[in-house]
Image: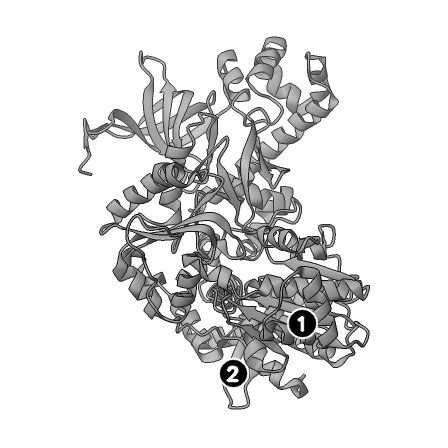
Amino acid sequence: MLNQVQTHAAPAEPLSGTVERVTFHSDESGFCVLKVKCRGHRELVTMVGSLPNVVPGELVEGAGEWIVNREHGRQFQAKSLKTLPPDSLAGIEKYLGSGLIKGIGPVYASKLVKKFGKEIFEVIESNSALLESCEGIGRVRRLRIKESWKETRSVRSIMAFLMAHGVSTARAFRIYKTYGEQAIVTVQADPYCLCRDIHGIGFLTADKIAQNLGVELTSDVRARAGVEFVLNEITHEGHCAYPREQLIEQAEGILQIPREIIENAIQYGLENRRLTLHEDPGGERFIYLAVLHDAEVMLASRLHAMAAGTHPCPEMDAAKAVTWAEGKIGIQLAEAQRRAVEQAVHSKVMVITGGPGVGKTTLINAVLKILHAKKMRVQLCAPTGRAAKRMAETTGCTAKTIHRLLAYDGSKGAFRFNETNPLEGDVFIVDESSMLDIYLAWQLVRAIPVRSAIILVGDVNQLPSVGPGSVLKDIITSDVFPVCRLNHVFRQAARSDIIMNAHRINEGQIPYLKEKGADSDFFMAEADDPEHCLQTLCKLVCEAIPAKFGFDPVEEIQVLTPMRKGLLGAQNLNTTLQQKLNRSDRAVERFGVRYALGDKVMQIENNYDKDVFNGDIGRITAMDEANGELTVSFDGTPVVYDVQELDELVTSYAITIHKSQGSEYPCVVIPLHTQHFIMLQRNLLYTAVTRGRKLVVLVGTKKAMAIAVNRQDAHRRITRLDFRLKREELF
């Protein structure tokens, strides 16, 4: 290695001591840099090696060699390293006070060591009732300490097991939570259960464990898991299914096994209802994960059943009703809006689509006036919390996220409302419907009574759903149900350069940029290279925009970027902006991310137990070092996270444009550079621009902007919803 030289090449020598400080530890690889107090060494020794987990106070025993790192000086590089419980009172106190054991912080660590000395571990393990004799420890804290001690021991054994088989340890806590004390036995029996059951562990990781455990490359269990892995991967690209031949080819490339084994694996999946085959009339064959096939088929069937009935709204003179509604909302509707309102009180399934400033909200408010006057029970919902909140604000009615409307039942692992336990309501209005993936759309529609009506509202030109399917687009293109297309931009909205430029982008035209200093809500700061772009963006977010427009850089400015990685990706932007916008020294590092008090964070997966969902944004409002927990406030609702659960959160000073769907922000700043070439698409830029309510600032190059405007997404998602809607007789 260029940055280090060996002082001598002697055989591995032993070195042991007490960990005083953990300078660095990677949850992914186990790599660590420790400051260790070793006998015979006056100064703390820098020890470098790999451990599943390590905390101050523990004893470490290593075998390795001394090196001189040109940057960091003399170090002991351990080829093998293991930890032992601390054996000194000072070490025990440091260990207990490290936050590893919930319920014991530095204060209680000191009290316990003074009272029980070196017997404290035995007391916690075998006679925890004695803990209550220590001042301040009652039954609740005592039980928490005992449970955390047991959990920590189990998690550490799982970590050691995983690490011994060449994989990261970052997900050990989730594995323990999923399988409990049977974790190791379960993984040994079927390593591929990890990629099915554990968030963050994919097939390649599970496959590595399997091979270390002796599973043959040509085994049937590996082939079956591999086929499902390929199908899961293509759902991340938005597809619901995959052509059978391409599925086999991809699986062959990944698994490196004969075709016949893969064909047998597919057949096994079909016979056991894990996979489903669909054959088009032209003979092309597609393989689905069974859950997605069922969702697609049943969604189409249910929509047809709903549309066939009579609208729950009583008969009326629709034209007179529209005129009455105009008087109530104080706005004269355009002709297209009037037709849409009339349609909404007659059609049981309909779509309202259009871009910003075309009057979707006004139209919905007019419909609501009529429905409420007719005593209709109306349910409003949207896919995200922010979209539901905005819907409630613009209508003055209660609106919920779809997940909260359906009420997840953790004991059953399913939504409480479904076709056998339907929701109550006569008309259901779903905003931001472009975000509906096939599975969520089915879960919602199955819970709506067949006698009820549904109105899907959304902008079909935005990015499609993050999950598989293109539900809104497929329903529109099927031409089976009434679709109201709003395209007239109203005068008040036309004064906004944001809205006008959004429509220009959608039409394939370059946004109009006014002269510097002109009054506008849409600007571009040109920056040629990525480094200059990063510096300009940070200056705009942290200084220039707050100074000129008065926006709070954390609460009101949102950076939206096309990608997660790279200099201008969400990960690096978050690290950079966090350093500039949050100087709090109260922080914890997990999974390669620093979480500090006051940070803006985003939930990146659905957590039904906590009632928080993918895309929800909050602020870290409290940290409890003793219990290893932090609290995040989501729109005023506090949610507590164990530090081991923080892989569900990312800092969100910058987020990807995909994650911004369904949200609006007072100000958005969008880095747009050719570094993002692969992601530059018209609907991506259009979606980003339409997230800004009062100000949009692009940072980058006009070349990148032109690429995005001129490139329409040629990536056609493989779905058959429109096909099924057109061919109801196939059910």
Identify residue type, mark 2. Answer: Arg
Q: Is residue 342 left or right of residue 563?
A: right
Percent position of residue 657, x then y:
44, 55
Question: Depth check: 420 or 704 in front?
Answer: 704
Name the secondary structure under disc 1.
helix
Q: Is residue 431 left or right of residue 89?
A: right
Screen quadrant of the N terminus: top left
Tell me which label, 2 or 1, sits earlier in the chain.
2
Question: Depth check: 731 or 389 in front?
Answer: 389
Q: Residue at horizontal 75%, vertical 62%? A: 378
- Whether residue 414 is visible here, answered yes or no, is no
Question: Depth check: 232 or 224 in front?
Answer: 232
Query: According to the image, what is the colour scheme of the structure?
Result: one colour
- Whether residue 701 is visible here, answered yes or no, is yes
Q: Residue at horizontal 38%, vertical 41%? A: 545
Write down the quadrant of residue 311 in the picture: bottom right
* Dot 1 alpha-carbon crowd within 10 angstroms: few under 14, some 14 to 19, many 20 or more: many
Q: Residue at horizontal 34%, vertical 64%? A: 708
Q: Is residue 704 left or right of residue 406?
A: left
Percent position of residue 575, x then y:
38, 39
Name the secondary structure under disc 2.
strand
Q: Which mark is residue 285?
A: 2
Percent position of residue 277, x then y:
57, 79
Direction bottom: furthest residue:
282
Q: Which mark is residue 341?
A: 1
Percent position of residue 567, x then y:
31, 47
Q: Nearer the viewer, mark 2 or mark 1?
A: 1
Q: Which mark is residue 183?
A: none
